[in-house]
Image (cartoon, rainbow, N blue to C red):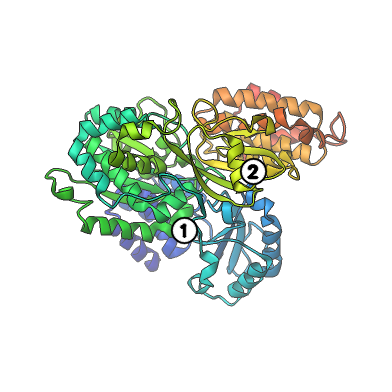
Amino acid sequence: MRHHHDAVEAVLTRQHRAPHRLVQVLRALQATLHWLPRDVLSQVADALHLPLAHVEGVAGFYRFFHTQPVGQYRVLFSDNITDRMRGSEALLHALCERLKVQAGVMRHDGRVSVATTSCTGLCDQGPALLINHRQVISRLTPARIEHMATLIEAQVPVAQWPAEWSHVDDQIRLADIKLGVQPAPGQGIAAAIARGPQGMLDDIKRSKLRGRGGAGFATGTKWQLCRNFPGQTHYVVCNADEGEPGTFKDRVLLSSFADTVFEGMTIAALVVGARQGLMYLRGEYRYLLEPLQAVLQRRREQHLLGKAIQGVGGFDFDIEIHVGAGAYVCGEESALIESLEGKRGTPRIRPPFPVEAGYLGQPTTVNNVETFCAAAHIAVHGGDWWARIGTPQSTGTKIHSVSGDCARPGLYEYPMGTRIGRILEDCGATNTQAVQVGGPSGVCLSPLDFGRRIGFEDVPTAGAFMVFDRTRDMFEVARNFAQFFAHESCGFCTPCRVGTELVVRRMDKLKNGWGSSEDIQVLYQLDKLMHGATHCGLGAAACNPLRDTIAKFRPAYEQHLKSLHFAPGFDLDAELSQARLATGRDDRGAHLENLA
């Protein structure tokens, strides 16, 4: 179609016809065409000299891309456990009933489609949803759902919906360094220039700063490795793909403290010798794109980005923002780089590590949003200052995204080493049964653990702090997390692709009253197998909440056991066949065959 041809040409021109910008090309085309027809993908493949199978593979990998028509209004309810606790499932059903549409299926007139998505980063003000992958609606109520249905039926453009629906609060409850008073723009850069690249690197190493994205790798070591590897160019990448359910700290840092984030990236560029920076912004945060670009432009005008930063000849550095398309696995740094290069977000085999061969094969340092904020503060105040905060092994402060059963959800910043119980007290949590720290891939703590402390030597965390009181069924919490991992598996390796699906089937079997005590033992075996055999950390961590909840809340599982035998008519072979169909492959291997 001529319309498609012109749209493709316009987008390709804006994206410089670069094959490594394929994800951005597809995002722009879908924003124009609403979905990605095959003839469009074929034209893109021809123009970029890529195999059509590659382009189709990328379009099929990300859940925010659609290769089949979807509704004019694409409504995605956040399906995180905290949204469910606030009634998201009932609200979804109410909207479907009002619009006479089936969840997961486009309505016959093409007007609307309603489905679920993973956590949208609004756990502190849910239930929440996304409209057309770019506008958020927070604090859903039955009244808002009713009004929304009326607006959709009347075909009112989303931009004309009530503005207060899309208001997102920072909800900073307790601020310390990174959520408190910020350095003036350029103050950290000036301090870093005064020290020089090596002096700034030495200060980062003295601070003992470790990554705030979850892995906790020493920031100074990472920057030194990147700096020392030869390459035509070096890159600084900010990982803003905050996809861990229950985490929303980076959302606030990007909303209100973007200057500090970009300052930290620029300081890293000075240290490693980079001229180009990239921010990978998760697709669910698309609504932050224009405000972030405005901050970047202002910094260019202030000579804090671009050529000769702060008048220093040769200090040239600029930042570009790439928007993801809905894939939790892209939070893993090598998968993120694959996505930046226009590919499916499949984690790489390492070595080589990104500091050796990262973006476009060049030395690349990838750090979390909060890590870059910390680096900017360290540049101003010094490494020794930061090292005196927290504990000897876990220096500085950590921001916690607190949600769930508490009176005051929001952001809390504490020195490392803070007691779990202190956080519960401050957020107004009472009658607490469990806390999930670090999101589904983290650890589940019972009241016996509330004396433990946040830190790499005790309870490490990427920032999520989800509270569950004694009215909650911890089996349902673990089941929601199992569904999340099965949905987000990239499908590359058999143990994760099939294992996560089998975990969900076992959990559903228990939920439906068909299970036996043997099923709990099988879940243990699946955990052991996946932990040691998966390609990346997603599969290895997929059973963390399962293992913790079985060990600490076993009665929650046992209450679902109706008998010690399978229900009449239950067919294991049929279950196994369905698992194969669901994953699209049946080469799972003898171990998984036995466990099914």
Q: Nearer the viewer, residue 498 or 287?
A: 287
Q: Nearer the viewer, residue 368 or 525?
A: 368
Where is residue 207 shown, x and y percent of the image? 34, 31
Q: Is residue 244 above or below residue 535?
A: below
* Residue type of the residue flagged with mark 2: Val
Q: Secondary structure at mark 1?
A: loop
Where is residue 480 shown, x and y percent of the image? 66, 43
Residue at the extreme left: 313
Where is residue 12 shown, x and y percent of the image? 31, 57
* Residue type of the residue flagged with mark 1: Pro
Q: Secondary structure at mark 2?
A: strand
With 196 as the anchor, is 591 left or right in this view?
right
Looking at the image, can residue 279 be seen?
yes
Residue 37: give its label: 1
Q: Nearer the viewer, residue 140 or 512?
A: 140
Residue marked by disc 2:
467
Q: Are marks 1 and 2 in contact (CB under 8 Å)?
A: no
Q: Quadrant of residue 420?
A: top right
